Amino acid sequence: MEKRLYVGGIPYDSTEEDLKTAFQGAGNVTFVKIIMDKMTNRPKGFGFVEMETEEEAQKAIEMFDGKEFAGRTIKVNEAKPMEPRQ
C-alpha cells in the first residue's frame, strides 16, 4: 500500500524530477508533487512524495528527515490528511 510523505523546506528551484530522483534511493516512488502558489505560480517550498510501500516510506524518512537537499535542510514525515477549512 502506498504511503504519502510530506516534504518541507524544498529549495524553490528544485523540480519534481529532482525530488523523485533523490527519493528513489529509498525505493519505488509512485507520485511527486511540489505545491505551487496559485497567485504567483511559484513553489511554496513544500510538497508530497508517495512511496510504494510502508517500508520504503520509513526508509525515506530515515534517509532525508533533517538532512540537506540541494543546499537546504528538509523535513520529511508521514503526511496527515488535510483538515477542512472553516
Image (tube, rainbow, N blue to C red):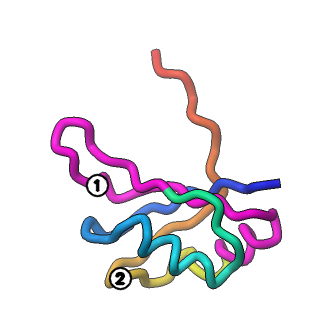
Label 2 neighbourhood size at 10 Å, few (<14), some (14-19), many (20+)?
some
From this view, report whether residue 65 is shown above or below residue 25.
Answer: above
Residue 35 point in image, percent of width and height: 38, 49
**Regarding mark 2 in the picture, which secondary structure is present there?**
loop
Distance of mark 1 from mark 2, alpha carbons? 15 Å
Residue 4 point in image, percent of width and height: 66, 54
What's under tag 2, amino acid-wise? Ala
Please identify the residue farthest to the top as the structure is shown: 86
What's under tag 1, amino acid-wise? Pro
Does residue 67 appear to the left or right of 71 in the view shown? right
From this view, report whether residue 16 is shown above or below residue 41.
Answer: below
Q: Please report the residue visible at 54 percent of the width from the left and 22 percent of the height from the top.
A: 84
Does residue 28 appear to the left or right of 84 in the view shown? right
Q: Which residues are magenta?
A: 33-61
Q: Please report the residue visible at 69 percent of the width from the left and 64 percent of the height from the top.
A: 51
> For residue 71, what is the image quadrant?
bottom left
The N terminus is located in which quarter?
A: bottom right
Residue 46 in magenta?
A: yes
Q: Please report the residue visible at 80 percent of the width from the left and 64 percent of the height from the top.
A: 53
> For residue 56, what is the image quadrant?
bottom right
Counting residues from the start of the chain, the first of labels 1 and 2 encountered is: 1
Closer to the camera in the image, 58 or 49 = 49
Does residue 24 appear to the left or right of 16 in the view shown? right
Residue 35 has which mark?
A: none
Q: Please report the residue visible at 53 percent of the width from the left and 55 percent of the height from the top.
A: 48
From this view, report whether residue 24 is shown above or below residue 47.
Answer: below
Closer to the camera in the image, 83 or 25 = 25
- Residue that mark 2 sits on: 70
Residue 24 point in image, percent of width and height: 61, 78
- Residue that mark 1 sits on: 43
